[in-house]
Image (spheres, grey):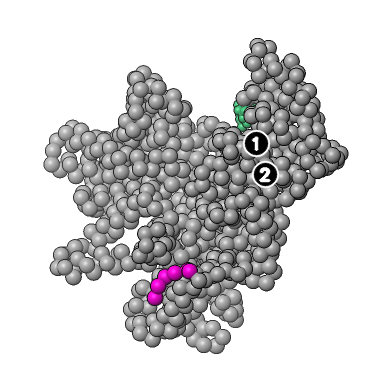
Amino acid sequence: MTATGGRRIGDVLLKVEDISLSFGGVRALSGVSFDIRKHEIRAIIGPNGAGKSSMLNVINGFYHPQKGKIIFKDIARTDIGPYDAASRGIARTFQNIALFRGMSTLDNIMTGRLLKMKRNLFWQALYWGPARREEMEHRAAAERIIDFLEIQSIRKVPVGRLPYGLQKRVELGRALAAEPELLLLDEPMAGMNVEEKEDMCRFILDVNDEFGTTIALIEHDMGVVMDISDRVVVLDYGKKIADGTPDEVRGNQAVIDAYLGVQH
Amino acid sequence: MGFFIEVLFGGFLAGVLYALVALGFVLIFKASGVFNFAQGAMVLFAALSLVRLMEWMPIPIALLVSVGIMIVFALVVERLVLRPLVNQEGIILFMATIGVSYFVDGFGQTIWGSEIYTLDLGLPKEPVIILESVFEGGVLVNKFDLVAAVIAGILVTVLAVFFQKTRIGRALRAVADDHQAAQSVGIPLRDIWVIVWSTSGIVALVAGIVWGSALGVQFSISLVALKALPVLILGGFTSVPGAIIGGLIIGAGEKLAEVFIGPSFGGGIENWFAYMLALLFLLVRPQGLFGERIIERV
Amino acid sequence: MLYREAGQFKTSYGDDQAIFPIRQDRIGVAIILLAAYLAIPLTASPYLFTSILIPFLIYALAAIGLNLLTGYCGQVSLGTGGFMAVGAYAAYNFAIRMPELNLLVVFLLAGGCAALVGVVFGIPSLRIKGFYLAVATLAAQFFMDWMFSRIKWFTNYTPSGSVNAPPLSLFGFAIDTPAERYYLILAIVTVMALAAKNLVRGRVGRSWMAIRDMDIAAEIIGIRPLRAKLSAFAVSSFYAGIAGALWAFLHLGSWEPLAFDINRSFTLLFMVIIGGLGSILGCFFGAAFILIVPLALNQIPTALGIPISTAMISHLEFMIFGALIVFFLIVEPHGLARLWALGKEKLRLWPFPH
Ligand SMILES: Nc1ncnc2c1ncn2[C@@H]1O[C@H](COP(=O)(O)OP(=O)(O)OP(=O)(O)O)[C@@H](O)[C@H]1O
Ligand SMILES: [Mg+2]
C-alpha cells in the first residue's frame, strides 16, 4: 500500500533506454533513460522546451528517435508507429487540445473505442445484427466514461463549443475509452482554474485507483506533481537531470538550478 | 534533332504562359496562405476588360484602367471574402475561391460579353528561323513566343526587385514567413492582402495579354489556366523560381509527350500528362521542387 | 401538429442512436417516403420525371458520395465527374459484353470499378493534403475525360464516340417509361442513402470524421489514415460510379464523355457545400437547389416579361452559384441542412423562446 491509494506498484511496464532525438540541428532529447512501473503515476517535469512532450511523442510512436530503445511490456523496439502504440495499449492526451472539433462529446469518446470495434464496412452499412450490437456495447462503455467524468450534460454538444476546461476533460475521456494500460497526459491541468485542477486531479487519481491504469504525466504545477505522483523524472535541455520520489527530486540541486535558470 | 528542339522550344514557350499564371498563384499563397483557385478567372477577367476597353480608348489608357479594375477587384475580394473568412482553414478558403472563380467568370462575361475577341497590341506574330548555324534548316519559332518569353522575364525581374528592394515588398516577405512578424513591420495584414491580390491581378493581366494575343480572348482561357496547377505542385506552392522552372518543365514535358508518345495512345495526352507527371512527382517529393518541408508537431 | 419531444423517453441507447430519434421526424419521413413512392408517381407528368425528379435523385446520390469523402473525411475532390464516368462506361461495357447480367449486378459492378479507380487516385492523399489533394483529384478528372474519348475500346469502337444504353429490363420487366425509371432510381437511392447514413453514424464514419478534424490525433488514437482515407475514396467513388451509371442509363440514354466533365464535378461540389458539408440530408437539399435555380432563372424573367438571352442566363447562373458558395462558406458552412436543423430547433421551442 502506498500513500496515494489502494493499489500496488508492480513491475516495470515501460522502459526507455538511451533515447536521442533531434530535429535538424535541434537536439530535443539526448540519451534519456527511465522506466515506468505498473500502476504508478510517473511525472515528467522540466522547464519549457526541455523535451517533455517530445518524450511522450517518442513513447507513443509519433516521433522516431535516432537512437535508443523503447521496451513496452517486455518487447523492445526502436521505432514504433502510432498505430502500434495505440493497439498495444498506450493512449494519450495532448498539450494543445487535439479533439475532433466537429464531433460531439459522445462521438469523440466513441472514437477512443474504434480500435476495439471490428465489424466491416458491409455490416456497418446495414447497421443491423452484429454491427448494431457492437455499437450498443461500445456505447454503453462510452456512457460509463461519461458518467465517470461527470459530463452527461454535454454528451451531444460539439466539442468545439465547449469551454477549455471541459474540452480537456473530454480529451481525457477519449483516451480512457481505449482502456489503455499506459496513459500519457501532456499538461492535463494547464490553463485551468483551481477548482478545475482539483477535479482533474481527482479524476487522474481515480483512474489510477479504480482501473489500475499506469499514468505518465507532464505538469508544470509543482504542487500537483508533488501531491499525486509516485516518482518524478526531470528533464532539462533534453537530458535527464534527476529521477526519484517527489521528495528526492525537490531537494536535488541540479533541479533547483534548472528551474532557477542557472547557466550551464 | 532540329524537330526535337522545335518541339522543346514550343513547349518552353507554352511553359512560360503556365508560369505566368502560376506566378499569380504563388504570390497570393506566399503572402496569405490562400490557394487562389480564381487565378484563371482573373486572367480571363483582366483580358476581357482590356480588350473591351480598347474599343473605347487608346491602348495605354485602357491598360491603366484595366490595372485599376484589378485593384478594385482585390479590394472587393479582401472585403467580401477574405476578411470574413480570416482564421478559417485553408481548405475552406480554397473552396471560397472556387466560388469567386465562378462568380468572376459569370460577371466578366455578363458585363464584357462572351464572344471571342482578338487582342492586338501590335506584338509581332510572324514566324522566324533561329539557330540556323547550329542545325541544318534551323529551328522554326514564332516571334510572338519570343516576345512572350521576354515579357515574362521582365515581369519576374520587376517582381523580384519589388520584393527585394521596396519596403512593401520586404513586408510581404515577412508575412510569408511569419504573420506575427508582419504585424511588427507596421503594415496591417489587410493592406498586405489587398496589395498581393492587386499584384496578382496585374500578373493576371499580363498573362491575359500574352494568352489573349495568342489565342484570342475567350472563356477557355479560364480553363487553360488550370494547367498552371500541376506547375505549382511541381515547383512548390511558395517558390517564385519554382513557378518558372516548374512551368518550363511542364510545358516542355507536355509537348514532348504529346508529340513523341501521344500518337501511340491515341493523342490528346497533353490534357492530363502534366497532372500525372505532377502526381508521380508528389509521391516522391510532396513539398515540390523548391517548397519547404513541413514537419508536423503536436 | 406540434413539434415536441416532451413525453418521448428513450429507453435504450439504440433508441438514442436512431436516425430520427424524435417521433414527429419519423412521421415526417414516412410522409415524404409515401409521397415519393405513391403520390408523385400517380400525379407527375413525364416532364417532371425526366427533367426534375430523375436528375434530382441521381444528383443527390452522387452528392452523397462526394459528401462522404469531402464533408465527412475532409478530402476535397474535384474529380467526382471522372468517377461517375467510370461508373457509366463500366456499366456500358458490362451490359453490352455480358448481356445476361442482371441490371442491378451491372450497376454494382460499375460502382465496384469506380471504387477501384477511386482508391488508385486516393493513394496520393496519404502523402498530400488539402488543396494539394484537390489538384491531384483533377488529374483523375482529366485522365478519365481523355480515356473515354480516346481509348476506343471503352466506347466499343462506335465511330461518333457517343454510346447508347442497351434496352433495360429488370427481372424480366422492361424499364422504359419515365415512371418505371423513376421507381428504379428511387429504390436504389433510398437504399444507398440509408446505407450512407448508417456508415457515418458508426465506426467507419467516426474514423473518417476523426481524420477530417485532426488527422494527427486520429492516428495517435489508433486510426490508420491509410485505411480511413482509402475506404472513404472507395465508398465515395462507389456512390459516384453508381450515380454515373444511373445518369447514363436512366437519365441520358445516350451520352459522350462530355456528360461527365469537370463542370459536373464542380456542380456536385457546390451541391455539397450549399446543402451542407457532413450531412446526408443536405445532399438532397443541395441537389434540389442546384436544379431549381437554373429552372427559376429560365422561367421567372419570361414570366415577368423581361427578355433575357440563354447566354445571359448561364452567366447569371455562374454568378449566383459563385456568390452562394462564398456566402454559405462564410455564414453557414453546414449549409441548408444546418439552417433546416436550426429551424426545427426554433419550432421545438416555439412559442417559448427558451
Ligand atoms: N516537430 C518538431 N520540429 C522541430 N523541432 C521540434 C519539434 N518538436 C519539438 N521540437 C523542439 O524540441 C525541443 C523540445 O520540445 P518539447 O515540445 O518536447 O518541449 P517541452 O518540454 O514539452 O516544452 P513545453 O513545456 O514548452 O511544452 C524544443 O526546442 C522544440 O522546439
Ligand atoms: Mg510540451
| Residue at image point 67% right, 61% down | A140
Earlier in the chain: of badge 1 and badge 2, it is: 1
Q: Chain of mark 1?
A: A
Q: Residue furthest bottom?
A: C172
The answer to whether residue C239 is left or right of residue A34 is left
Q: In this picture, is A60 found above or below C263?
A: above
- Front residue (pair C246, C279): C279
Find residue A247 and name its label: none
Could you classify mark 1 by the number of other residues whose Cα lies within 10 Å: few (under 14), some (14-19), or many (20 or more)? many
Label 1 amino acid? Asp
Choose top left, top right, bottom left or bottom right for residue C3.
bottom left
Relative height, residue B265 to residue A203 (above, below) = below
For discs 1 and 2, the disc positioned in front in the rendered view: 2
Which is the main secondary structure of the residues drawn in magenta?
loop
Looking at the image, can residue B175 be seen?
Answer: yes
* Residue toward you, C214 or C165: C214
